[in-house]
Image: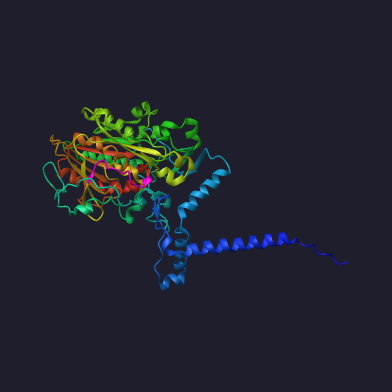
């Protein structure tokens, strides 16, 4: 006997038809939305990077498939309202469970930490494979890919930049000048060909707990040998001309995570590494050890929660320690004019996008130098741009507010302070940790120059020749422990400091 088919109620049939029609309509809508070219973003504020561009057409690209792969990447990377969808996705993920603590592993390779580095044994450079030669992992490029936006607030008065870089006695070559309109633009990040040299300041690995993230430190012995050798060699070659100082900035996890938690992240012992670095320095190098003084103030707001940098307060305590080593009297923190910029979401947030961080962002607090608040930075195209040492970044993106200090990261910058006439001059070899330190140094030097070795490309010749020709009083290495753990970055530093 034939089995009778169960009759589907008409109401259910209509419901199914409506469901299919609604689903089809939604799919057609989002497909058409994806095809709307004008709505496609070119940058991601959430990820703080440029998005993929539509690939250039070429016959070879069509034949090998790279053109179509590029179109696919462009389509998915620049989908309209991309950041909004991603934010919604994070919220939905949070509804599935409470994400209070998590470890994001990055480059977990680490070396044993000796008490003292054997500098007689040359660093081992691992051979690069044909696929990876000349490149670093994509995750190491985040900080260099930050995007600066045009200023919307009224720009401060711009003074004409001098026709030459100032020097105590011997000025170098002329720097091209800019118009006032050009000087009012926000600093631009270095060209993309320098991106691989950015070290993993916020990408090596993170321990995320609620609204705070902490970097995981990995010691690299080969990179450490190169760094210490560079500092020692600099001190030896400048003996009798310049004082050479070394200040290493720790990361926040060293102060705020328990030994048990640090051990669970499988990172290196940063305190032991700091001692190894300092114990391996030549006696000619003046050591500025800041770990102990920062530890004393760990209950204060000395590190950001959403970013890898120390705050201006952390930099202030480092400045006081430097002043003690140098033998000068630091200014009291109460003497400075204070500027505050709330809503800062730094590189840690960009990396992990924790909703708890977005709900409780950091505040950038800045202290304006007492004697002078103008500097000149040299853009990657050679333009000399006059800029405030501490700048109003109220209208800047949430991820860019740390650039309130010293115009952010540029290849070469300097200050000629007309209100300090002591003839003292300083060269900083730095990454971004030094940016918030520079405003405090301004009141103690007539001339300050700083080279960001990640971007500098010999536009003023070799750094050592620059130091000698300008009769520099002090050379200050200000470096984070994470950046100097990159072998590629230390090889670049070594080549620039020959």
Q: Is residue 376 left or right of residue 190?
A: left
Q: How is the image coloured?
A: rainbow
Residue 344 x/y as whole percent:
38, 41
Q: Is residue 267 left or right of residue 332?
A: right
Res 88 visible:
yes
Residue 122 x/y as whole percent:
34, 44
Over which residues does the magenta segment extend? Answer: 387-399
Based on the displayed image, in which of its 4 quarters is residue 230 positioned?
A: top left
Residue sitting farthest toward the right: 1
Residue 312 x/y as whole percent:
32, 35
Residue 87 x/y as whole percent:
48, 49
Q: Nearer the viewer, residue 364 or 232?
A: 364
In the rendered image, which quarter contains the N terminus?
bottom right
Task: Identify which residue is drawn at 52% across, 63% down.
Answer: 31
Magenta-span inclusion, residue 142: no
Q: Say above or below: 434 vs 178.
A: above
Q: Say above or below: 350 vs 289.
A: below
């Amino acid at each position: 006997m034939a089995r009778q088919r169960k009759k589907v109620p008409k109401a259910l049939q209509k419901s199914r038809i409506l469901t299919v029609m609604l689903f089809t309509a939604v799919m057609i809508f989002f497909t058409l939305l994806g095809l709307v070219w004008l709505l496609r973003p070119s940058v991601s504020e959430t990820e703080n990077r440029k998005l993929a561009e539509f690939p250039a057409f070429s016959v070879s690209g069509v034949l090998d498939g790279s053109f179509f792969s590029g179109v696919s990447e462009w389509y998915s990377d620049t989908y309209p309202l991309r950041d909004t969808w991603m934010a919604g996705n994070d919220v939905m993920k949070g509804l599935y469970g409470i994400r209070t603590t998590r470890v994001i592993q990055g480059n977990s390779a680490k070396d044993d930490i000796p008490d003292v580095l054997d500098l007689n044994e040359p660093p081992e450079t691992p051979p690069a494979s044909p696929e990876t030669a000349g490149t670093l992992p994509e995750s190491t490029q985040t900080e260099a890919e930050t995007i600066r936006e045009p200023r919307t607030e009224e720009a401060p008065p711009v003074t004409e930049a001098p026709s030459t870089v100032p020097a105590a006695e011997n000025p170098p070559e002329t720097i091209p000048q800019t118009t006032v309109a050009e000087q009012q633009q926000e600093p631009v990040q270095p060209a993309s060909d320098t991106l691989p040299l950015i070290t993993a300041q916020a990408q090596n690995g993170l321990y995320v707990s609620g609204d705070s993230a902490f970097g995981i430190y990995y010691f690299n012995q080969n990179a450490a040998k190169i760094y210490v050798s560079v500092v020692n060699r600099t001190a030896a070659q400048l003996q009798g001309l310049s004082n050479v100082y070394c200040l290493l900035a720790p990361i926040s996890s060293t102060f705020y995570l328990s030994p048990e938690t640090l051990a669970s992240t499988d990172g290196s012992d940063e305190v032991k590494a700091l001692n190894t670095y300092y114990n391996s320095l030549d006696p000619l190098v003046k050591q500025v050890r800041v770990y102990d003084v920062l530890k004393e103030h760990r209950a204060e707001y000395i590190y950001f929660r959403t970013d890898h940098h120390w705050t201006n307060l952390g930099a202030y305590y480092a400045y006081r320690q430097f002043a003690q080593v140098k033998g000068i009297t630091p200014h009291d923190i109460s003497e400075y004019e204070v500027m505050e910029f709330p809503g800062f979401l730094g590189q840690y947030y960009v990396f992990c996008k924790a909703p708890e961080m977005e709900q409780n962002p950091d505040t950038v607090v800045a202290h304006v130098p007492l004697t002078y608040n103008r500097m000149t930075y040299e853009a990657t195209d050679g333009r000399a741009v006059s800029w405030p040492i501490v700048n109003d970044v109220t209208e800047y993106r949430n991820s860019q507010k740390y650039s309130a200090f010293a115009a952010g990261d540029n290849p070469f910058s300097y200050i000629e302070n007309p209100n300090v006439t002591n003839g003292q001059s300083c060269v900083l070899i730095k990454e971004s940790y030094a940016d918030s330190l520079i405003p405090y140094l301004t009141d103690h030097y007539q001339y300050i120059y700083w080279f960001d070795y990640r971007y500098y490309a010999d536009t003023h010749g070799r750094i050592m020749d620059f130091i000698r020709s300008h009769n520099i009083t002090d050379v200050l290495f200000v470096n984070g422990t994470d950046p100097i753990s990159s072998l590629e970055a230390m090889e670049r530093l070594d080549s620039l400091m020959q």
